Image (cartoon, rainbow, N blue to C red):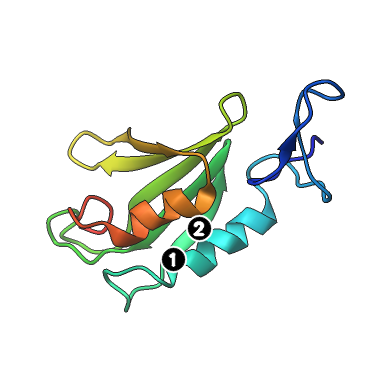
Amino acid sequence: FFFQAEDGIRDYKVTGVQTCALPISPHPNQVDLRRIERALRARKRYKYVHPSVHPVDAGYEITSPNCSRNIAADGGEILIARLRYDIETQCWSVLVRDHAHGLWVEHTRHAKLHEALAVINDDPQRRFWP
């Protein structure tokens, strides 16, 4: 495992990777999964539903009980967002679900996880929490 930190120090002469005091496993990992779960509690929309966070390849998928008859008239769980970490660019991609076409579409990129989560939580255009 490499060392990874959102606010780490770059040491190109020695290792060429970002360094920090504690090793964190590649994504997905339990530390960031819990961080995402905690952050979702601060969202502005649909605070009465309890979203779930699931590990997926290179990131996390957020699902929620359906609150919109426009997405799935029969209820059930819907896909809210996907967070993907790109190890090469060291950026978080926030993907939004295009429910009409069944695709994930990149919405924004962020250097820090908390910035990506703020986009999902604020959601002024109701792209994530329809």
Marks 1/2 in contact by CB < 8 Å: the verdict is: yes
Q: Residues within 10 Å of mark 2 (few under 14, many from 20)?
A: some
Which residue corresponds to the image point at 18% horizontal and 62% vertical from the top-left?
A: 68
Question: Of residues 35 and 99, which is closer to you in this image?
Answer: 35
Which residue corresponds to the image point at 35% horizontal and 68% vertical from the top-left?
A: 43
Which residue corresponds to the image point at 32% horizontal and 79% vertical from the top-left?
A: 48
Q: Residue 40 has which mark? A: 1
Quick one: quadrant of the C terminus? bottom left
Q: Residue 89 has which mark? A: none
Query: Against 100, is 70 above or below?
Result: below
Query: Against 46, is 34 above or below?
Result: above
Residue 9 lies in quadrant: top right
Q: Which residue is mark 2?
A: 53
Question: Of residues 115 and 127, which is closer to you in this image?
Answer: 115
Q: Residue 80 location in percent, x, y?
A: 34, 53
Quick one: quadrant of the N terminus? top right
Question: Of residues 96 and 102, which is closer to you in this image?
Answer: 96
